[in-house]
Image (spheres, helix red, strand yellow):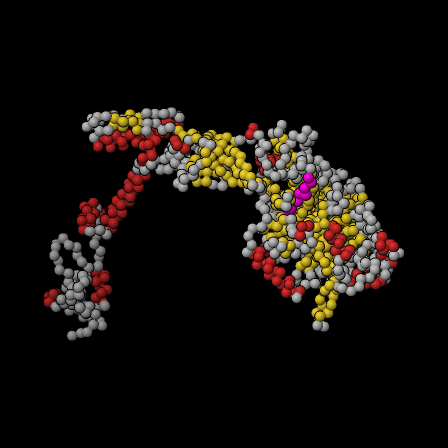
Amino acid sequence: MLFGMAFNAFCLVLCIVLGAAEFGPAPRITWHLKEINLMHFHVSGISNYSTLLLSEEKDVLYVGAREAIFAVSSVNVAEKLHEAYWKVSDEKNYECAWKGKSKQTECLNYIRVIQPLNDKTLYVCGTNAFQPTCDYLDLTDFRLLGKSEDGKGRCPFDPAQSYTSVMVDGELYSGTSFNFLGSEPIIFRHSPQSQLRTEYAVPWLNEPSFVYADVIRAPASNPEGDDDKVYFFFTEVSVEYEFFSKLLIPRVARVCKGDQGGQRTLQKKWTSFLKAKLLCHSAENNLIFNVVNDVFIRKHPDSTEPTIYGVFTSHLNNVGLSAVCAYSVSAVEEVFAKGKYMHSATVEQSNTKWVRYNGEVPKPRPGACINNEARAMNYTSSLNLPDMTLQFIKDHPLMDDFVTPVGNKPKLVLQNVIYTQIVVDRVKALDGISYDIMFLSTDKGMLHKAVSQDTEMRIIEEIVLFPHQQPVQTLLLSNKEGKRFIYAGSNTGVVQSPLAFCEKFTSCKDCILTRDPYCAWHPVKRSCVDILHESNADGSLMQKLNGDATQCPDSAEIQKSMKHTVKSGSTVELECTQKSKLASLVWQFNKEPLKTELHKHHPLEHAIIIFTVTQNDAGIYECLSQEEVGNTKVSQVLVKHVVEVEKVPTILESTSHPYTQSAAKSQTTTVLNKGLELSTRKKTTARILTTPVVGTSGSTRIIDSTNSLTDSKVPEVQMEKAMYLTKPSDCSLLIVLVLLFGLLFMILLAYNCYKGFLPNWCLRMRTVLFSGKQKNPPDYPDCEQGVKENLVEPKCSPSQYEDTQKIPQDTGYETEMDYGNGTIPHAVKTDENESVQPFDVKCDLKYADSDGD
């Protein structure tokens, strides 16, 4: 049954996703690197900037990379303060390579743990060529103290393995692997007092991929007297569901900070370890997201309950869907405190199934922290818990109930995006409402800023963080007042970005339409400002998160105006750039909607092209941006183009005799072209007069040069971005081609005549031209002698050949005469001037193989 449910679920997911329409909102604006000012940090020869630690008190950002630790300014990460290098010895590098690892990449020291121990010391760990090692970094002179400790259980062996860690009151909690092969996962606490770890068993951890860990403090006024808890988030292979392949399940696990292990059972093991499923699914689209990539716990200073945000993808990651789900801590604790357990049961004496446990649960409740209920039963520590409770939690670490998201649906579902990291900030807008702003990084180096308002999720903007596409490996948020930034680490460096780009919006409507809780319009400064940096004591700032821009004054609109002077018949391109991807461009001509014609106008994404400009096209073109917000359409003018068309000079044409009129028209066209060139250079108007020709009427009329050009279809040259067309009346190219072909023809004719390939008249002409250079006839005696040697007894009878010549047969074709069996006729001279033919022998020749008479 479980197999069928899982199989049907994933088949449904696959079918729907592959044939689904687009999900989620599109980013309204995309900021590229050349448009914004981001701070970058990178050191030549150093890579893998994957570990970040922020000290808001000192305004320092600590960066862990490959074989190096840096301290940079948190206000400007490009400013490097200190550096310390931690390289692998040659001996360990060789030993690692001998075990089959890459000497150039894997057998190095990747810094994976940077945690604050106190104000003057950091606790750091690195992979150290598959021999994880930890040390202490003295912040006074920024150097390693050399107190190397075994890092097993605190840092992964393989730099490619997943890991997470958090320092809680001087104790390091970590989730990683415990052996060289990475086959023994562990949740470990390193403490001078007591070191605890998970049981090495499949029900506890089954090939987990750790992503996040953090502590949630118990409220001071906690009526249950509960303990602080450390939460771990990971994805592991399911043990409760059967599938044809490994089925991944997102999990949340928690341990109690005051756990000290058991006295006899679970010695030096967690007695409070419990784990449950995280459910992130969209019931509307029947989509299930079963891989958690990252988690962020938003701890509200004005609220007693934090919110857990997680980014998820599907196990079938080729479908390209990501989701964001939010969970309340109370929902997680509800599952751990009151939910059902699962236990293994043997089915058909072969397979082990994990099913719900409906039996009696011992007291105190297994997996619970030491609280007032346990203290009332005289259990003040995990060391004196009864063995029945400890044995039960050892066999039943998995909960049957799952944690449901807030609202029973994802906050955001987006297609063609893989989210890798998430951080969440809370800002109080001018309307008095606090909003959670989600910053989501992608596997292509992008950063999305999203906000939920009135059950609507919007992606305010998209930021390009790196010059080249690469996954964001870590994301960090600074909450310090006046110095709030986003820090993103990747394989090539660290990027610092502000939380908003309000100053990029130059108009009131654009500032309002962005609907960014960080941004507001300042009517006095006439600029878009950040509310975190600008005082609103007088209440003059304008912020409408519903997009209502009706209160924006017209004087606040800053329009860009451009003037174009073009010539009649030319082509002009009017540009209009719109940043909002949710808006559409509309063109107006002289305050009226532009009526586009198929062969006249060609609209583009950021421009419009007008072909064959005439005087009717002169005027004012306005590019408007129209964006729908709710049921309202907001319009604003982005740019204004003033198009002026130069008047072409007029000419005087006579209306006389047709022949004379045609000649005059030809002269007019020639002179007109010269006049247009002068008008282009000197910007003057010329009038061309033709000499009147006496005709029937003898009258003259004025021809406007624009009409003349239109009739002859001769487009003019535009000043900028014009399309130059060839004039039909310009025959210079045709004349050149005719002369060229004529010259080639004469050359070929002379060559063939010289070689004797042409008829007799050409040969006679060649004889006349080359009479003094005629070649001597070839001498054929040698050839005749060679032929005679191959003949048998020639019978030289001059008259015999003439008498016995065979009459050719009439075959209907003009062919050579058939002279019989090898008989060569004697050429009869018809003209004394004829040249002597070779083999002119008057005798009867017989070949050796011919029949003799």
Q: Nearer the viewer, residue 146 or 520?
A: 520
Residue 211 colored magenta?
no
- Residue 484, image x, y percentages: 69, 38
Quadrant location of the C terminus? bottom left
Magenta stretch? 433-441
Quarter occupied by residue 525: top right
Q: Can residue 622 be seen in this snapshot?
A: yes
Identity of the residue furthest to the right in this view: 378
Residue sitting at x 75%, y 43%: 303
Q: Nearer the viewer, residue 656 or 33?
A: 656
Q: Is residue 405 left or right of residue 550?
A: right
- Residue 734, image x, y percentages: 30, 40
Residue sitting at x 22%, y 47%: 773
Identity of the residue furthest to the front in this view: 631
Q: Can residue 88 be seen in this snapshot?
A: no
- Residue 339, image x, y percentages: 75, 58
Q: Is residue 757 left or right of residue 613?
A: left
Q: Main secondary structure of the magenta part?
A: strand
Quadrant location of the N terminus? bottom right
Can you say whether 121 is above or below 696 in the image?
Answer: below
Residue sitting at x 72%, y 53%: 233
Residue sitting at x 66%, y 54%: 280
Quarter occupied by residue 598: top left
